[in-house]
Image (spheres, helix red, strand yellow):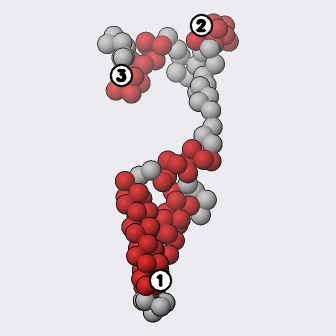
């Protein structure tokens, strides 16, 4: 939780920020003050949170509610198509198989696009 006494720096006027930080706007910090602040606060760097593995990224793309619904729809359509193909002497069921393939292609394209590989 933020300290209530800490100002919202982005809301302050520039001259107020300059006064509070004790800097000269035209020249910035002198070397001694910059060195002291570096020792006190450390370098101005973001903490490394580690890279996400490709599997973690893929899982993040596939666990969305809509994607799960599409996966279930593709599986259901494929299952119905296979059932109809096996019970109709390969006459019916192709529409469901094509639907399942189309849904699978959409899922793959969405996943590739969302992960930045497309």
User: What is the x, y in percent for residue 35?
Assistant: 66, 10
Tag 3: Cα neighbours inside 10 Å, few (<14), some, or many (≥20)? few
Q: Quadrant of the N terminus?
A: top left
Q: Which residue is mark 2?
A: 40
**Foreground residue, 105 or 26?**
105
Vertical arrangement, residue 68 with respect to residue 51, above or below: below
- C-beta proximity under 8 Å, tags 2 and 3: no
Q: Which residue is mark 3?
A: 8
**Foreground residue, 42 or 111?**
111
- Residue 9 is labelled as none
Vertical arrangement, residue 2 with respect to residue 112, above or below: above
Residue at mark 3 to residue at mark 1: CA–CA distance: 68 Å
Q: Going 43% across and 85% down the picture, which residue do you hit? A: 87
- C-beta proximity under 8 Å, tags 1 and 2: no
Reading the chain from its start, which is encountered first: label 2 or label 3? 3
Q: Quadrant of residue 75?
A: bottom left
Q: At numbered mark 2, what does the secondary structure look like: helix, strand or loop?
A: helix
Residue at mark 2 to residue at mark 3: CA–CA distance: 21 Å
Q: Which residue is mark 1?
A: 86
Q: Going 52% across and 21% down the picture, which residue do you hit? A: 25
């Amino acid at each position: 939780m933020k300290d209530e006494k800490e100002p919202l720096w982005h809301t302050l006027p520039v001259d107020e920020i300059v006064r509070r930080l004790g800097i000269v706007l035209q020249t910035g910090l002198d070397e001694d003050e910059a060195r002291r602040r570096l020792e006190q606060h450390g370098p101005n760097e973001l903490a490394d949170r580690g890279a996400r593995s490709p599997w973690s990224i893929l899982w993040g793309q596939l666990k969305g509610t809509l994607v799960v619904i599409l996966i279930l729809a593709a599986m259901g359509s494929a299952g119905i198509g296979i059932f109809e193909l096996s019970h109709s002497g390969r006459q019916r069921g192709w529409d469901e198989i094509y639907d399942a393939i189309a849904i699978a292609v959409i899922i793959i394209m969405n996943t590739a696009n969302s992960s930045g590989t497309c």
